[in-house]
Image (cartoon, rainbow, N blue to C red):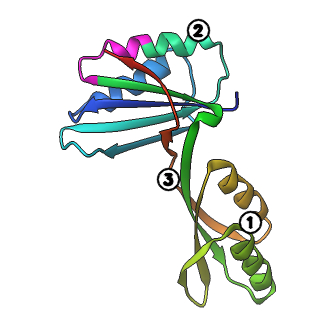
Amino acid sequence: MDRIIISIFVENNPGVLARVVLLFSQRVYNIESLTVSATDKDDISRITICTKPSKTRATIDQIIKQIKKLIEVKEILLIEGDNALSRDLALIRFSLEKSNLDDINNIINKFDAKIIHLSKESIMLEIAGNPSHIDECLEEAKKYNISEVCRTGIAAIEKSATIFIK
């Protein structure tokens, strides 16, 4: 099991995110990625938390039980391993030098990246895909004068899910 994704549908109220994240912190469980977004319902938000199973399954089960107790939580989806259809987005800025243009062009072609900004000093790429695709691109891009990286966090939809309803 390489990652666990928990999607939590909550009432769109101030402080809900802080209470959810606190439950992870209290159990010393690291959050690898955190995304919060609106849903098709104006009063409901989706919190997507990605974590690596660094502790026992019982710890995750305990966190889910505690999350379920929060009044604003409407539904929890536990998405494990290959059950997730997930995407991540990264923006990568390279310092532009004639010596690295061919290498950057190879990254664009190999990882299906898009040029979103070009100036005399730098080139900025956008790459979207599953998290391992982004990781692989960033690992290869490290060789070519990256000056800045910004990553969004994982958005995921389950193929099928274990659903915990309050």
- First to last magenta residue range: 65-73
Q: Type of residue at label 1?
A: Ala
Q: Nearer the viewer, residue 71 or 119?
A: 71
Question: Which secondary structure lies at badge 2?
Answer: helix
Question: Which secondary structure lies at badge 3?
Answer: loop
Q: How many marks?
A: 3
> Where residue 10 sits: x, y (%)?
28, 30
> Where residue 67 sits: x, y (%)?
38, 17
Q: Tell me the number on the disc at residue 152.
A: 3
Q: Type of residue at label 2?
A: Ala
Q: Residues within 10 Å of mark 2 (few under 14, many from 20)?
A: few
Question: Which secondary structure lies at badge 1?
Answer: helix
Taking the spot 22% from the left edge, 36% from the top edge, the residue there is: 12
Quarter of the picture holding the N terminus:
top right
Q: Residues within 10 Å of mark 1 (few under 14, many from 20)?
A: some
Q: Are marks 3 and 2 in contact (CB under 8 Å)?
A: no
The residue where tag 2 is placed is 58
Tell me the distance, in whole angstroms, between the alpha carbons under discs 1 and 3: 18 Å
Tell me the distance, in whole angstroms, between the alpha carbons under discs 2 and 1: 38 Å
Q: Nearer the viewer, residue 115 or 75?
A: 75
The residue where tag 1 is placed is 141
Q: Nearer the viewer, residue 25 or 133?
A: 133
